[in-house]
Image: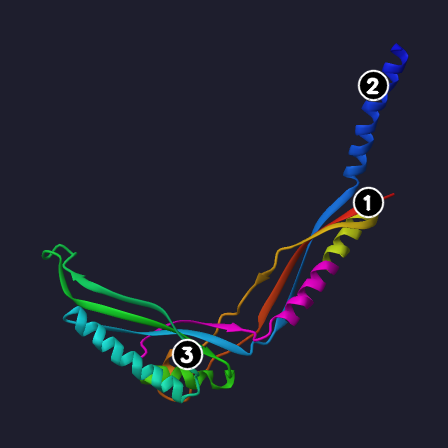
Amino acid sequence: MRLIKALVLSTALVLPAAAMAEAQAQITVTGEATVQATPDMATISLGVTTDGETAADAMAANTKALQAVIERLKAAGIEERDLQTSNLSLNPNWVGYDGSSTPRIAGYVASNMLNVRVRALDGLGSVLDASIADGANTLNGITFELAAPRPAQDEARKAAVADAASRAALLAEAAGAKLGAILSITETPAYSNPTPMFRADAAAGAPVPVATGQIGMTASVTVSYELVK
């Protein structure tokens, strides 16, 4: 009876150790890849900032100026669906914080920001000119995009998986093993935009020159492989 119990105990100790060894016979790597694509549309963040003696004056001036900008943008070919207010603010203009006098309100400042989607990039400079000509005095930046990003994203995913396989094979060979079946794949996608380049002093002459560059569609995958001897 004692012999049987000892045998059972010995087997119980051996099996977990074997199972642990089998569970450790795997490798996990991260593969990354970036596919460059030429953008085919852009979103401009622009707006109008005005001031006035009263809050009503500041807001009225802002509304008038922004309406003129919107009308000029529509005339430049921008559709209603591609215009969206992103931020509207009205704040008192405090002065006297330098210690020379008691802080007081010296008028009000109104600001209205607008996101403008441009679907024809060859007219991007003209759209910027149109907005500036009619009172847009705030430009927060330009974001370039792809109307259909999925094909470039899928190419990046395929390349990331291939990169993971190459890394895993190299490490497995260095360890004297070979890759077995894939145990798991986890994706952590990422998206990056280029920084547009333009000259602020170009508005008075030819349309503002803008370099669209390329968009880097980046994919990252973590893959676990079984290791075999």
Q: Is residue 123 left or right of residue 96?
A: right
Q: State the residue in front, 172 or 43.
A: 43
* Residue 216 position (above or below residue 203): above
Q: Residue furthest front?
A: 1
Chain part drawn in magenta: 135-162
- The answer to whether any part of residue 6 appears in the image is yes
The secondary element bearing badge 3 is classed as: loop
Q: Residue furthest top?
A: 2
As drawn, the label of residue 227 is 1
| Alpha carbon distance from label 3 to label 1 | 56 Å
- The answer to whether any part of residue 135 appears in the image is no
* Amino acid identity at mark 1: Leu
> Going from the N terminus, do you reach mark 3 or mark 1 first?
3
> Going from the N terminus, do you reach mark 2 or mark 1 first?
2
The secondary element bearing badge 2 is classed as: helix
As drawn, the label of residue 212 is none
* Of labels 2 and 1, the one closer to you: 2
Residue at image coords 51%, 84%: 120
* Amino acid identity at mark 3: Arg
* Of labels 2 and 3, the one closer to you: 2
Percent position of residue 193, x then y: 53, 68
Residue that numbered label 2 is attached to: 9
Query: For residue 155, which quarter of the picture?
Result: bottom right
As drawn, the label of residue 199 is 3
| Alpha carbon distance from label 2 to label 1 | 30 Å
Colour basis: rainbow
Percent position of residue 81, x then y: 44, 78
